[in-house]
Structure formats: C-alpha cells, structure tokens
Image (tube, rainbow, N blue to C red):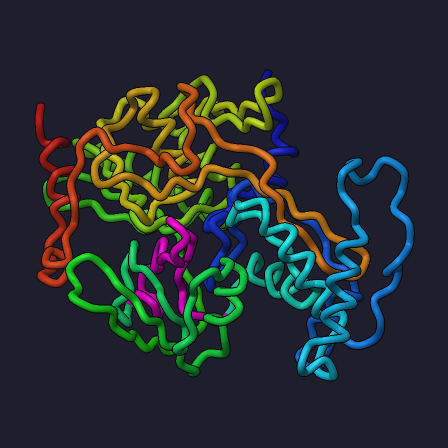
Amino acid sequence: MHYKENKISKLKVFGLIVSAIVLIFVGYGAGLYSAGTSEVAREMAKKETVYLGKVLGKYSQPEKGVLARDIDFNLFWDVWDTLERKYVDRDKLNEKEMFYGALKGMVNAAGDPYTVFMDPKLAVEFEESMTGTFEGIGAEIGIRKEILTIIAPLSGMPAERAGLRAGDKVYAIDGESTAGISIDEAVNKIRGPKGTDVVLTISRDGLEAAEDITITRGTIVVKSVNTELRDDNIFVVKISNFNSDTSGLFNQAVGEIIKNNPRGVVLDLRNNPGGYLDTAVDVASEWIEDGVIVSEEFDDENKNDFWARGRARLKDYKTVVLTNQGSASASEIVAGALQDYGKATIVGTRTFGKGSVQTLEEFKDGSSVKITVAKWLTPKGNYINKEGIIPDVEVDLTLEDYEEGRDPQMDKAVELLKVE
C-alpha cells in the first residue's frame, strides 16, 4: 500500500541530522516530526531569561505503576538534598538548572547521540535552526565514535572557505574541549551573529597535529541544486541538501537532462547532510518507477514503506552517484535505493551512516525531547544507521588531491560513463 502523500510531507530526514542540524540554513531532520513552539518557550529563550524560582512537585508520589518495583526514586532527592547541603558554593546552585541537567542526563543515558533533552531556551534555538536562513558557519556536524565530527561543510559557506572538510574531528570550540559534548550543545557554542569568529580545533588524516581554524560567521543561504553540462556531454547534478527548494530545482534539472540527452548523468551527493524525506523520495523516483524507496522500521513487527512516485524520467540514463563520508540521511536514502535497484553505480567512499528517525516531543514548560523512534532500511532491507552505503567502486579523495584541485572521484564517474 502506498504511503499517503500528506503524511510524507510532514516528515523530515534529520540530518546530523539527524545528525543534528548544524549552523545551516533550513530544516533538516532525519525523520523528525515537526511540532509547534509555545509562548512559554519563546519567553524562556530570550537572552535575558535566567532560571529562577523553585522546582515544583519535588516530593510528590509517583502515579501507580509508573516506576519499576526495584527503583527507589527517593535516591534522586537524597542526592539533590545532599548537594544543596554540602556543596561548597551551594549559594550559587540554581535549582532549575539542576533539574534540567538531571533530565538531560537521564535522556543521555539512552546512549544515542540523536536522542536529546533540550531545555526551553535550547528547544527554541533548535526550532529556529530548522527554519529559514540564519547566521552561522554553514556546516553539519555529528558524533562519530564519541568524537564531534564535521559531516559536511556547505559549498561556498564560511566553514568551507576557512578550510573545514568532511570528516574533520573537532576537539575544541573556542579552546573548550568537546569531550562528552552533545550535538545540540555544540550547535549552541558554534552558532553566532555574522561577523563574529569561532575557533575550532580540528584533526584530520594527513595532519601531524591538531590545528586551530578560525571561522568568521556569516549569513547562510544556499541554492540546493546546481547543474553542469560538461564538454564531454556528461550532465552533472550537484545536490547540496534536500531542502524545500530542491524538488522544484531538481525538476528543472531533469528537464535540462531530457532536453540535452547526455551520454550519462552524475548525481553528486558528496557532503550532502540530508533534508526532507519526501524530497529524497521525489529524487529517487526519477530513476525508480515502482517499488519501495526506503522503509521506516519501528520494531520487528512495525514498518512503514515509502513508495516510488512513478515518474522515472531518468530510468534509461546511465548514472553514477558520488558519495563520501559527508553524505548522510536523505542522501543515503537516495544512494541506497538507486544502488539496490541497479539504477546507478555508487562511486566514492562509504557514507556517514545516519539512518535513524526522531520525533520531537514538547512539554508545557517549553522544553522538549528529541527521541529516536525508528531506523531506515534500503529497499533490500539493509540498515543505513551506522553502516552507511558502501560504494560499488571505492575511490578516495586525499588531502593532497584536495589541495591540488584534483577530483579522482569525479574522474572515475566520468570514466565509467564513457564506457560503452
């Protein structure tokens, strides 16, 4: 049964963002279900707001059956009271910060970097990062092997101009260690008004030691689709993210491809951190006429299938898809679907592996919890999360290649398309 269009349109693939969406320009969210923001949250988000007052309901009895038999919640309050009695600077303790910190710790105990508690101020900042143009450095970040990592610097944005690359490991932000940091905390530290600087301490393969990169923040605006008809009659479509403008721009690109009838198509998804799920389905459907594009698995017995839209105007064009470790979320959905159906050859390096779905639950005080509720599977049933998409032809792009302006991945794609 085909998934209803109006339901699909409400889903977003989160990109780091799942992953969390970082410092970019419009809403990404690997399966993030959107929700409104209360006036309380907006008030709490104002810069001058501080957490004052008492925490209510400290010693109220839990509802029957809410807690497991062997859990004595009195321990929480024993620790709370001990801290307030004995901490050396107890006059500086803030009860609401303690309370929200406890909730954050509880959610972090899930061990999932995409399941995050956000206090009211951070919740509003997160929602703002999911809508429209804003100011920052223009890069998507994620947590990989417990290290803050650059998933994708966006083309032409401050992060890329300063020299950040996909895969860079960020060990400090303005001199503060990122050990144990959450994605949302990192976003909060890196974002800021245009014209201001942020210093990231990064390490990457090819560097002998970590180095500081100073990035001047700017206004982040990106056209998500760019095209080029090469002199060798190969048509290149570069999708930088699956944004609200992508479907329209990609539809124009398909029209150009049909008009020019090239010998082949390169779909460049490198450093594409993801975006809207329905847009990913739209793009994949230009090659896949019928069948499941991606499945959303909640558990062993519950699964939603997202079906091709039946257009498939590019099904007869020889196609190569370029990926790297900066290709995440919606990018992986498209690459995985085209690979599984044999509609394209995947060239490059293994993708990021952001294949989980989050829902955003808001609470009456304006705080919220972003919870992973499902995982993505390719049409053949392969998990995307942590595994990523493995290219059919693995080609690396080294630091030396990058600095010398070479692109062996594109070169390989062109070579494959020229083979009759």
Quadrant of residue 84 within the rendered picture: bottom right
Q: Position of residue 272 (x, y in %)?
A: 36, 49
Which residue is pictured at 86% across the width and 60% down the height? 58
Left or right: 121, with 69 as reference point:
left
Residue range in magenta is 135-160
Visible residue check, residue 333: yes
Q: Quadrant of residue 54?
A: bottom right
| 158 drawn magenta | yes
Could you tell me residue 165's position as x and y percent?
27, 60
Magenta highlight on residue 15: no
- Residue 325 position in % (x across, y down): 30, 46
Residue at (11, 43) in percent of width and height:
411
Q: Position of residue 255 (x, y in %)?
A: 35, 37
Depth check, front residue: 88 or 212: 88
* Residue 43 seen from this side: no
Residue in the picture at 61% in, 30% down: 5
Image vertical order of residue 296 relative to residue 194, above or below: above
Quarter of the picture holding the C terminus: top left
Q: Quadrant of the N terminus?
A: top right
